[in-house]
Image: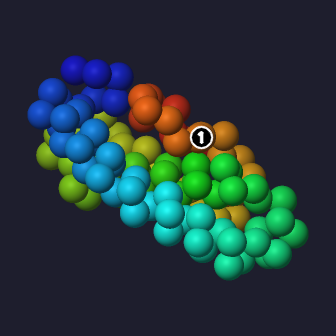
Amino acid sequence: MNPAGLSALGTLLFLMIRGLFLWILVPGGIVVWLCTSPYMLWRGVGLGRFLGWLDVNFIAGLLRWVLRPFVANIPPSWVPFSKIKTVTHRIGLTQNTNDLNP
């Protein structure tokens, strides 16, 4: 088992699904951030933090719904928008899902 508690098949599915959806999540998140940039900047939320927040919540949803049969321990929780300033996660090639909770 890996640190996230996923089986080998679960890890493979996680990487495939997340990799596919990042192609939608990142461009869509950039468009949303640009459309709401005055509000985001007023709240002190940069593009990297916003994309990190989207990815954290996407991973939480993926582990709580789609991959729940493959998760051995408690999946990470959602991060509400009101706590977006606590998110330090950035999108990267490798991911330790134990560090997703702010």
Displayed quadrant of residue 90: top right
Image x and y of residue 98, in percent: 45, 31
* Residue density around tag 1, few if under 14, some if 14–19, many if 20 or more, within 10 Å: many
Q: How many marks?
A: 1
Q: Please, is residue 54 above or below residue 18 in the view?
A: below
Query: Which residue lies most toward the right here?
Result: 42
Image x and y of residue 84, in percent: 68, 56
Q: Residue at x 76, y 59 (%)?
A: 45
Image x and y of residue 72, in percent: 23, 33
Disc 1 marks which residue? 89
Nearest the eye: 30 or 10: 30
Question: In the rendered view, does 72 fall on the left or right side of 25?
Answer: left
Q: Please, is residue 1 above or below residue 43 in the view?
A: above
Q: Quadrant of the N terminus?
A: top left
Q: Residue at x 60, y 73 (%)?
A: 32
Question: In the rendered view, does 96 fall on the left or right side of 4?
Answer: right
Q: Please, is residue 54 above or below residue 42 in the view?
A: above
Q: Residue at x 71, y 77 (%)?
A: 36
Element at badge 1?
loop
Q: Residue at x 45, y 61 (%)?
A: 25
Colouring of the image: rainbow
Q: Amino acid at mark 1?
A: His
Question: In the rendered view, does 25 fall on the left or right side of 67?
Answer: right
Q: Quadrant of the C terminus?
A: top right
Q: Is residue 69 visible?
A: yes
Image x and y of residue 94, in percent: 42, 29
Q: Please, is residue 84 above or below residue 74 in the view?
A: below
Q: Is residue 57 visible?
A: no
